[in-house]
Every structure is written in C-alpha cells, then in structure tokens.
Image (spheres, grey):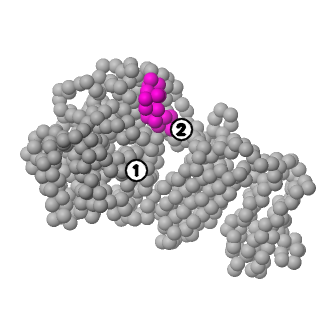
Amino acid sequence: MKKLKPVVGELTFLFLLIISHPAAAQTATYKDVAVIIDSSSGISDSIGRYFANIHNIPEKNLIYVIAPMTEEIDSMQFENLRQQIESLLISRNLKDSINYIVTTKGVPLKVKRNGLNSNSSVESELSLILGPYASYIGNSGWVNSPYYNQQYDFTRAKFGIYLVTRLDGYSFSDIKNLIDRSSSISPFIPSGANFVLDEDPTYQLLAPDLNNNMNMAADSLLARGQIVTLDKTTTFLTNQSNVLGYVSWGSNDSNHTTNAIPHNTYLPGAIGETYVSTSARSFAYPPVYGQSLIADLIAEGITAVKGYTYEPYSNTITDVSILLSMYVDGYTVAESYYAATKFLSWMEVVIGDPKFRIISTRLPIDGDPLPVQITSFTVAAKDNNAFLSWSTATETNCYGFEIQRSRKSQTTIDSNNWTKVAFIAGAGTSNSEHHYSFEDCLGSPGKYSYRIKQIDNDGAITFYGERGIEIVNVNKKLTLNDNYPNPFNPSTTISFSTVNDGPTSLRIFNILGQAIATLFNRTSLAGETHQVTFDGAAFPSGTYFSRLESGNQSIVKKMILSK
C-alpha cells in the first residue's frame, strides 16, 4: 500500500477541459428536481417526503406512481411506470424545467427483458424519457451518453437527458442517514480526507483500463492537492479512515474479505465505485450474497455510490479518473457520475442526492450563471514551447487571466511551486464569446503543468486546469514569440528564451528603424523564459518591430499598434 502526498499531475498529450456552460446551470435550490414516489410503498413515501422537506422541493415536483412492489419488473410494467411519470411531468409543466430525477426505495429498480443486452436499470432508462434519445429505451444494447466526459454544468436543455439517481439502502435508517450526510455543503474539502484506490494487478491483462483509470485518478487527485492511498498489490484494503473516495474490485478482488465489505470510516460526502457486476442487483434485507453489494457501503456510511443491476461489460464501468476529479472540482454527484459513464439505457444506477457537491466552489446563486463561463481550455506541445488556448462564452467583472506554470523534476512536482508566466486581460463584462491564447517558451525538456488563475475586478479568484505536457526534444535556437495581443492597444506581451548564457537585449523599433524602447538588457540564462510588456500609450498607431539579440543571433517580429 502506498500513501501519496499531493503533487501536481501531468498528462503528455493534448487535452480538452470543458469547464462550464453558458446556459442556466443547476441552481442552489432543488426546484429542478423531480422525486418519484410509489403510492403503494410506505418507505417510498417516507423517503421521498423526507428528502423533499430537507431541500424544500415543491409539492408539484413529487411524482406519485403506482408500480409493482418488486425490485424487478418486465418491459410492459416499465412502460406503464414510464407513462405515468411522463404524463405528470407534462401536465405539471415540468418537462423542460426539471434537470434531475430522484427515484426512491419502493420504486422498481430494474427491468428484465428478453435478451441479455436488453436488461436495464429503471434509472438509466428514465434518463432518456421525453427527449431526443427516448426511442432508444428498451432496445438491445446501450446508447452513447451525450454527457460523457463533458465537464459542463449540466442542463437538460443542453444535453437532452435527465440525470437520474436513486435513494436506496437496506433500511429507512440507512437511507435517511445517507440523505442527512448530504444535507449541507462545506466550503472546503476536509483536512486529511483520503481517496482509497485499491487495484488488483491480476486483472492487468483481462481489463487493464480499470486499473489504469485508478492510476490516472491518483495523478488527477494529487494534482488537486488531495491525499491518495493507491494500492497496487493483491491485498484487499480494509479499515481505512477519513475516506472521501473509494474504488476497489470488491468481490472480484482476488483476496477480498467476507462479502468484500471494506469496513471503512467515511467522511460525509464520500463517494465510491466498485468493479463488480450486479453490485446493485438488490437492496433487500437480509442480503443474498455471491457478488458484493453497494448497499453495504451505504450502511457503512458512504454518501454516494454507483452499482449495476445486471452483468455489464467492463467498458461500461465508471471511469473513476473522470468521476473523482470532477467531484473534487465541485461538480455535483450526478454530474460527476454521469460524466464518467459512457452509456445510457443500460444497467447502472447511482445512489445518492444528485445535487450534492463536496465543496461550494461551483455552487451558483439561483438563476445566475457562473461569473466567467470558460468553455474550453487546451494545452499542446509545439516544438519546444507550450501552446495554451482557452475560450469564454460569457464574462462578468473579469479582470483577466494569470497563467501559472510548475515544472516537474526527476522525482516530483512541488504543488506549491507555481510561477506566474503571463497575464492576459479579460473582457470585463461580456455576453459574447472570446478566445485567448499564449505560447510559453520552455527552452529545456521536462514535464510542465499549467493552470489559469482567473481574477475578477473585485479581487476574487478561481483556478482552472492543473494539467500539463511533456517536452521531449528541444530545438536549440533563440526563440521570440509573437506578441499578444496583436494588434494591441495600448500594451502587449512579448516572451522569449535564449540558447546560451549571455548578454541579451529586446528592443522596440518604429517603421523608420529608430529604437523607441528597451524592454530587456541584461544577462539571460540558457533555456530561461522571459516575459515583458510593451506599453504603446505614448506612441502613435502604426507598425512596430521587436528585435531580440543574444550572442550572434537575432530575431525580428512585426507588431501593430491600433488606437
């Protein structure tokens, strides 16, 4: 077992991180949540009412249905259940205002159909109702989820589905405790919180992606400053404390303990995933074992967990590298699980409050979008440079974006060693799309990590990114990057790097060849990146040139000042 301290993680390829969406996102209230209650089930009514009271869910959002008193139903019974839910959503004018649906214990759990690949969970099928994917319900196989790996604030208007979770467990007490654990949101992740990732190397040939996803999750969590316990042995970890995230092979682990119950101590808000088919086959008590059950994790104190009602394929299992990083970034339980789920109309079920999030960082004010809506952020290696680009859909009170970099040594990255390498002015307040880019001259091989520090005019800050690239081969040449922005008014940023130690100068010339400003004139170290700003406020509009000289090399770039 290896307990890892936080470091900055790295990725060695171009990545796309979509951070939020300009449409109205989920709000601080639960007005966009519908709760499904079985009229004939006392526990369903008790759970639904308790959950609704905790979160002030409107009465019209409580959808009472009449369904069989069994966890498993057939296709005809499901269609009857579906029709009741759809009719009430439409008649109450909720169809387009609801983003989340919550089912309760007592509502059927799974649908048994003719054909192995036609079986499904009730929740996965309900995610597709009344939308563009409804025709896939009940078909053989699955449909690709439009929200998979999307890392947007979820809305049904954008993605055409509902995010559906379930409130279930062995008893009312277990479910009530689960609801209570998710009834308040902390402003920060608890100190000492531990993410336990328990691999089983015996599956490295049969299902390598599942262990690999744990490895990537560990890197991602460490990059976010979290504590990770990553076990790569055949030991089945038990009795872990302060657990905020738990992933294991459950009863598929080669050396699991009795019923693969880990006996962990969980922090409020803890989430989990086990690589076990049929882990959500039943929540009845007393349990009937064979494969392990996520109901045991709920009884132990976990706040949200995903399981499977029938035998899925390994490629349908949650991608925990997406799940855990999104959750730590402040996305909701439902967003985190569904973004990590490739397929719908399938066999998965998420247990927990769909709108709970571990921190309040992303919690929006009712009706208001996030202040800055960053829709994309990419980083790519380009020769011996890092090329960053990002876009915003809207900006409110945005002063600008500070680009920060950290470099990994042979053994580690110091997660506190972030260096400011650039500042790009924001658009202030704008409802139109804006595109930004920056090229960082690195000059030497290695692994680098980047993040963006977005700064409001009132001083509030938000960090995005913490991803990276690897520079393998470095071209040994003097580098002068294009100034940004260009054209500019009145100032622009210029960055450069040199090949050798020695005197270096960067000067600005006008169209007549006259030097009008010296921005840099001192010794530069080989591979060191410099960034300077040229202020053209005192000069007229026109064409100017930046000239970099070092040793016997020089580079000239053209700039346009447009007032």
Q: Residue at x 83, y 77 (%)?
A: 511
Whole-percent x and y of residue 548? 83, 61
Q: Return the residue at label 2.
A: 219
**Does any portion of residue 176 appear in the rendered image?**
no
The magenta-colored residue range is 196-216
Q: Residue lying farthest left?
A: 40
Q: Which mark is residue 300?
A: none
* Residue 44 as seen in the image, left or right of residue 501: left
* Residue 244 as seen in the image, left or right of residue 10: left
Q: Quadrant of residue 174?
A: top left
Q: Residue at x 14, y 42 (%)?
A: 73
Pointer 1 local density, CA inside 10 Å: few below 14, some 14–19, many at least 20: some
Q: Residue at x 10, y 41 (%)?
A: 69
Query: Could you tell me which secondary element the residue under label 1 belongs to?
Result: loop
Whole-percent x and y of residue 420? 67, 53
Q: Quadrant of residue 162?
A: bottom left
* Quadrant containing the C terminus in the rendered view: bottom right
Query: Could you tell me which secondary element the residue under label 2 belongs to?
Result: helix
- The foreground one among 558 and 300 is 558
Tell me the kind of residue under disc 2. Asp
Give the spatial CA distance, label 1 vs label 2.
Answer: 20 Å
Whole-percent x and y of residue 257? 34, 19
Q: Return the residue at label 1.
A: 148
Tell me the kind of residue under disc 1. Tyr
Whole-percent x and y of residue 327? 42, 45
Q: Is residue 429 above or below residue 229?
A: below
- The foreground one among 148 and 286 is 148
Q: Nearer the viewer, mark 1 or mark 2?
A: 1
**Does any portion of residue 318 appear in the rendered image?**
yes
**How many numbered tags mark residues here?**
2
Find out whether the residues at labels 1 and 2 contact each other: C-beta distance under 8 Å. no
